[in-house]
Each structure stands twice: as structure tokens, then as C-alpha cells.
Image: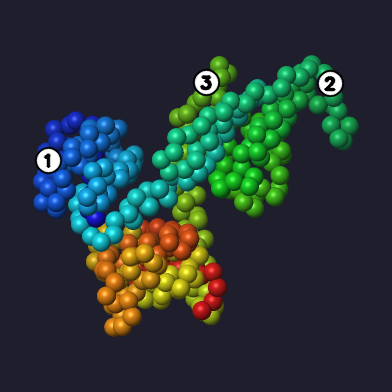
Amino acid sequence: MVSAYFPISGRPDDADVAVRWRAVLRELAGLGVGARVRESLTRRVLGMPPGPAVLAAFIVDGEDEPTVFQMPGACRTEMVVRAALPRILPVLAWLQHQPPYVLAVVGRDGADIEIHPGGTAPMVVRTVTAPVGDGATRTRDRRGRHRHPGQDGWERTGSCVADVLKDQLVGGRTRLLLLAGDPRALHAVDQGLPGSMRHQVSVRYVPGGRGQDGTWHRGGLNVQQQLRAWVDEQNRRVLRRIGEGRDANGWVAEGASATLEALAHGRVRVLVVVNDAEDRRTAWFVPGGAEASMTLPATGSAGLHRRAALADVAVRAAILTGAEIRIVEPDTVDAPAEGIGALCRFGG
């Protein structure tokens, strides 16, 4: 298995990109990657969007087509390496910051709703138009006070948008809702969202909205900042629970050996790995199973074991056992000891 990461900072047809890519092609050829695969990768590089972006490629021996990920906005150094397992930690770190989310930009007469499935999946846009009512009719609120004629419009819009959001979010895998637009419309949306949904979906407000002509004012919608903040919050929550559970009779595993043992026994619910490019530690795994350890067993299945980077072995075992994976950076406060740890499904 050959893993390759190729970053670009400008256009893919820039002269410096061509020079660097020729050097990568020579490395790939030296590792036994065939001409057909190299040609396929060259087409993918030329088809990349302007940077910053990173192309990640995973090449299985004997296969003519590599598995390729384009990671817009990602930044990392070049890497070409042959190993027993793919080096997917940088891809997982990038995907972690592309979570599923819904963005609703709400105005008086309706909303534009972006549904982002997460990862590399394309977004879906829905336009919601509020039902037309008699805005000139004077009504009273529950306290008997006269309401402004325009209030009904805001409430109709908010109720309609809230219904669409409930259908999209309740029971699904999306855990983040971003709301932008007129404060009166957002208040009505907020009032229409069920309290039970707040336990599974984080609601955040971002500045910006639609103008009088109906066009979006996207300049103030710093969505990426909101996504980063939400992901960091999820990571801090897991790290806090690891810190609180260190003495909880096996509900937390910390350090390389303890974490791999918990993974091998299917105990891990959430794996936390520090994304450290300088980590040179290795571990052992068995193809076809989730067995993982820091040392090679002297008996049993010792002859079946293969060695790979510690993080790759841990991530592989987590995927095979259905554990969630959280990636944190080396300077993260309260990161697990030895750069790896886990919350467990049950005590050990």
C-alpha cells in the first residue's frame, strides 16, 4: 500500500506545482507504482481546484485505479510512503472538520436552507417560502395586546422554517444547525423548534442574511469558523470525559498499550489520537481482525502479525469495532498521555 499527499497553494497548472509533482511521480515510480496509476493521479492533480488544497491518494498493489480524496482548504507537507496500512490520519482530521450540518438563512418571506451531508458529499439547497397571510389584519396576542400587522408574517415564516428543520434534523445524524438572517425571523424559528431537539442538535447563530432584494449577504457568514469552533467543542468534551474517568475502573484507556488492548477487545466507544506527523512509533495488527498490540506475541497468531504506524493500527481497529474516532492536534490542552486514549463502552 502506497499513501501520497500532495498540497497545492495556488493553481494546479502553476510552474512550481509541475516541478514538485514530477518529483512525486519519480518517488511513486521508485515505490513500484505503475504508469497507468501515475497517469491517473496526474489527471486528478490537474483537475484540482485552486489551493490551498491537498490531494490524498491510496494505491493498492496490483490495482490500476487509486483511491483519491481532494481536500479543499487543507494544508500539510508532501508525503509519499509505502506501508502495510494506509496513512489515513490526515484525511480523517480533514473530514472531522467537514461535519454534517444545516445552514438556514431566514428572512421575512422565507428561507434558503443548505443541507450539508458532511465529508465530500455535495450540499442540497432548499428554498422555503412562507404561506401568504393577511398582513393587514390586526390580532391580539395571548395577553390581549394588539400585535403589529407584520408580526404574523414573521411568525408564519418562523413556524414554516422550523417545521422543515425538524423534518430534516430530528432522528438524523446531523448534530449542528447554523441560523442566520433577520433577528425577528430567527426568534420565530427558535420558538418553533422542539426542546427535545436541543439535546441532539447544537444551534448556533451566525451574522449575515438576505437583503431587501432577496440576495444573500454571504460576507458575514463565517461558516468555517463556526464549524471549527463546534468541532473543537466536541473534542474538548471527549477530552474532559477522559480526564474525569481516569480512575473509573477501566472506563478510560490511556497510553498506547492500554488503548490498543481496549481496541482489540472491542471495548472502545471513542478513540482519541493526536495527529503528530513526527510520531514514529509502530504497532502490530493481524489482517482480517481487530487484534492490535505494541509488542509481537511470542505464541498464537504471531506469524500472522504485520507492523504499521501506531496511529494507523489504532484507527483500523476502531473502524473494525465501530468506535468513533476523534483527531486532535499536538498542542491540544489535556490531550491523552502518549498521544492516544479512549472512552470505553464498559469497564475492564
- Considering only order in the chain, which callout, 3 or 1, is on the residue closer to the N terminus? 1
Q: What amino acid does circle 1 point to?
A: Arg
The earlier-in-sequence mark between 2 and 3 is 2
Amino acid type, callout 2: Arg
Whichever of labels 1 and 2 marks the residue nearer the N terminus, that label is 1
Where in the figure is residue 234, as x and y percent of width and height? 50, 56
Q: Which residue is mark 1?
A: 22
Q: Secondary structure at mark 1?
A: helix
Query: In the rendering, which numbered label is found on residue 80?
Result: none
Contact flag, marks 2 and 3 (Cβ < 8 Å)? no
Determine the CA span between mark 1 and mark 3: 45 Å
In the image, residue 11 above or below residue 53: above
Instruction: Compute the Cα span from label 1 to label 2.
Output: 73 Å
Tell me: 163 left or right of 125: right
Q: Which residue is mark 3?
A: 215
**Which residue appears at 65% of the width and 49% of the height?**
198
Count every numbered label the image shows and give the total.
Answer: 3
The percent position of residue 132, horizontal first and vertical second, equals 73, 19
Residue 338 sits above or below residue 220 on the image? below
Position in image of residue 236 (x %, y %):
48, 60
Q: Residue at x 29, y 71 (%)?
A: 305
Residue 138, disc: 2
Query: In the drawing, does residue 267 fall left or right of residue 298?
Result: right
